[in-house]
Image: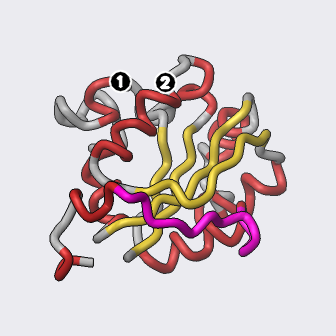
Amino acid sequence: MERTFILLKPDCVQRRLMGRILARFEDKGLNVVAMKMLQITPELAKQHYAEHVQKGWYPTLEEFVTGGPVVAAVLEGLEAIRVVREMLGATNGLQAAPGTIRGDFSSSRQMNLVHGSDGAESAAREIALYFKPSDFCDDTPTISKWMRAADEA
């Protein structure tokens, strides 16, 4: 099983889309193994978006991501990183395909509702920024045997 990090951004929280979006991940068979609501500080934003801090548009990104509560979560499942990225769709909601989260709910590049880790290394780094080992609830839902064949686990 693979783990990935998602962040339901302030626009997602303010638009009351948290439950609808989390349900889509659960409907796909991904398990939520850690989750919390928090307010991102400028310091945490700089750590999370470290590769973008020197870019001219970073201050706008920081203002956005620190502008309201967010929900941080860790999802677990087969090929979770790839599956989540595909479910999110293109970064710009106007370019995201219908049926994807951004394609269905976003019409912005920045206010695109959800961040998802883009690879195993970034998933590990982002998970460690938001969660400590004791935050995880490792449990296999009883429905799991009906979500994939035993030899796929």
**Can you see residue 90?**
no
Give left or right: position of 37 versus 143.
right
Which numbered mark, 2 or 1, is in the foreground of this view?
A: 2
> Which colour scheme appears in the figure?
secondary structure
Q: How crowded is mark 2: few (under 14 residues within 10 Å), some or many (20 or more)?
A: some
| Tag 2 and tag 1, C-beta contact below 8 Å | yes
- Check disc 2 and give the amino acid type: Leu
Q: Crowdedness of circle 1 by 10 Å Cα count: few (<14), some, many (20+)? A: some
At horizontal 44% and vertical 34% (from top left) the residue drawn is 112
Q: Where is residue 42 in the image (x, y as percent from the top left)?
A: 82, 48
Residue 84 place in picture, x, y as percent = 34, 54
Any magenta on residue 132? yes
Q: Where is residue 144 in the image (x, y as percent from the top left)?
A: 31, 61
| Residue 73 x, y percent position in the rendering | 58, 52
Q: Is residue 97 left or right of residue 81?
A: left
Q: In the picture, which quadrant includes the N terminus?
A: bottom left
147 versus 125 height, above or below: above
Does residue 24 belong to the magenta stretch?
no
Q: Magenta segment, which residues? A: 131-142
Residue 17's disc is 2
Rendered position, 16 above or below 146: above
User: What residue is drawn where x is 60% and y is 43%?
Assistant: 57
Q: Mark 1 points at which residue?
A: 105
x 79%, y 39%: residue:
39
Query: Is any atom of residue 49 visible in this view?
Result: yes
When asked about the image quadrant of residue 153, the answer is: bottom left
Name the residue nearer the viewer: 88 or 63: 88
